[in-house]
Amino acid sequence: MGCACILISLRTEPTIVAMRILILICALCVTILTVRSEAPEKQLFRVMSYNVENYFDCVDDSLTKDEEYLPGGMRGWNYSRYEQKQANIARVIVAVGGWNPPALVGLCEVESRRAMIDLTRYATLKSLKYAFVHNESPDTRGVDVALLYQPDVFQVLDEKAVGIKFPDAPNSTTRDLLYVMGRVPNGDTLHVFVCHFPSRLGGELESEHKRNHVASVLRQEIDTIFFEDSDANIIVMGDFNDYPDNESMAKVLQANFPVAPFELSKLYNPMFPLHMEGKGTHKHEGDWGALDQIIVSGSLLENNAGFYSLSDAAHIFDADFLSEDDLKFLGKQPFRTYAGMKYNEGFSDHFPVYIDLWY
């Protein structure tokens, strides 16, 4: 942007008044350019959530039922396929990040700490220098959730596993919720939950009470945070095995449709509009649905804050390389690792989702 010099043509010599006007205009232009050049550009803070579909290591865990994903097991899992799985996960994370890796990546269906160490230190993802938070949970198959983070933009202050006990089925187990509190570059505190709600195995309605219960435990944790800080910055992400308008999400968790004005101590679901448009992260019997979601507190939708997002800043990452032809129901479907028992060499049965924030 420049500033044109204004020449005042007079029949006589320029008057003192004209010269002063010219000087003032030039000084004003210089001031505007200086202020604009000194204004800092907003920095991107991208948050990603991805169900990676059965990322198992090759070591037997005697406490879990991981036999089918062991060398010699019924799925033919081996170290070569394990390395390919790592390479696929890394490729997706890099693709979602673009020029800069996502600041946070919530992962679902990760078997172990060993698998996370191999992914971040020895696989192709190692160049991005991610650190991670992971806790072993009592899931029968041994799959957990984890959080990858970039230490230069997210300083972990606290973390814990939130266990789930079902009152009507004390012997039933599921994945823990993962809670991580950290500091972002502008100094704000960010509370992060990574979730993988109980599956719909056995039927949606038959299993609904389990997801509702997990949502109630999560809501209690969030209410505790809001009680201590009514304008807390909170992000909840993961595979909820329910859609934004299901009871667990809309009523129990109270993740609202993102329409202004936003209340600081309420939750909003930026994935809701995408779901209403028929877009999804998972395809079942020919129908797409947004099982994978990222939910934010109202405080993060205030764009005059130092750390913020927008109600339309959530996206489903459905790049071509993550899809394959759906021969049964037509169209496309996620290019998954296994199609039934057949090794498919793909990525996952879920598309990742991400949301952009700025500081």
Image (cartoon, grey):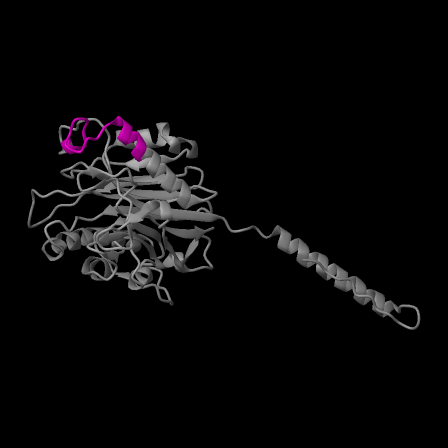
Q: Position of residue 129 (x, y in %)?
A: 41, 33
Q: Is residue 167 above or below residue 259?
A: above
Q: Position of residue 123 (x, y in %)?
A: 36, 30
Q: Position of residue 95 (x, y in %)?
A: 41, 43
Total numbered circles = 0
Q: Is residue 61 above or below residue 313?
A: above
Q: Is residue 93 left or right of residue 211?
A: right
Instruction: Answer yes or no: is residue 169 visible.
Output: yes
Residue 297 is one of the magenta-drawn residues:
no
Q: Is residue 235 left or right of residue 30?
A: left
Instruction: Answer yes or no: is residue 156 visible.
Output: no
Q: Position of residue 163 (x, y in %)?
A: 18, 43
Q: Residue at x 38, y 33 (%)?
A: 125
Q: Is residue 165 left or right of residue 241?
A: left
- Taking the view exactly as shown, the residue that stands out farthest to the front is 327
The residues colored magenta run 67-85
- Tell me the quarter of the image containing the N terminus: bottom right
Q: Nearer the viewer, residue 74 or 131?
A: 74
Q: Nearer the viewer, residue 24 or 355?
A: 355
Q: Is residue 179 above or below residue 298?
A: above
Residue 79 is one of the magenta-drawn residues:
yes
Q: Nearer the viewer, residue 239 or 154?
A: 239
- Taking the view exactly as shown, the residue that stands out farthest to the right is 12
Q: Residue at x 33, y 45 (%)?
A: 322
Q: Name the image quarter holding residue 139.
A: top left
